[in-house]
Amino acid sequence: QVQVVESGGGLVQFGGSLRLSCAASGSIFRINDMTWHRQAPGKQRELVAAITRGGTTTYADSVKGRFTISRDDDRHMVYLQMNSLKSEDTAVYYCSADVLFTALQHANYWGQGTRVTVSS
């Protein structure tokens, strides 16, 4: 069993910063890709940022230069540093982890989400 739990969301003013954290725990052999997605009210879930085990990062155009994804493989964690926040960043943010629970078996796990609200 693997659990993924996000934290760090909250209310922040326009232009402010937040750091989201996501911890994976349980029967983990190794974690491959880790991602942050978000879903705003009335919109589809979208990819915000992704990071491979090797540290290669990918960002949505809307957050490039403002958000930074990083990971700590020793602690099975991934982070999202969000700066210069805008009202359009308001959403529920979800973490996912592609977890290998044996050398050959893997599955993608999602957290329950953490809400970010940017006030103008």
Image: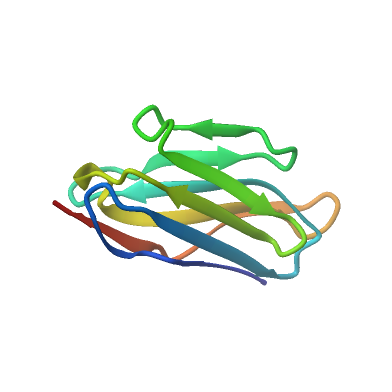
Quadrant in which the N terminus appears: bottom right
Residue 48 found in image quarter: top left
Q: Which residue is drawn at 25% across and 49% down?
A: 40
Numbered-mark total: 0
Q: Reply above or below: 29 against 49.
A: below
Horizontally, is 59 left or right of 51 in the view?
left
Closer to the camera in the image, 1 or 60: 60
Q: Where is residue 94 in the image (x, y as percent from the top left)?
A: 43, 56
Q: Which residue is drawn at 77% across and 61% down?
A: 74
Closer to the camera in the image, 84 or 38: 84
Horizontally, is 66 left or right of 41 in the view?
right
Horizontally, is 28 left or right of 71 in the view?
right
Q: Where is residue 76 in the image (x, y as percent from the top left)?
A: 69, 61
Q: Residue at the far right: name it.
A: 103
Q: Position of residue 57 (x, y in %)?
A: 59, 34
Q: Which residue is drawn at 43% across and 32% down?
A: 65
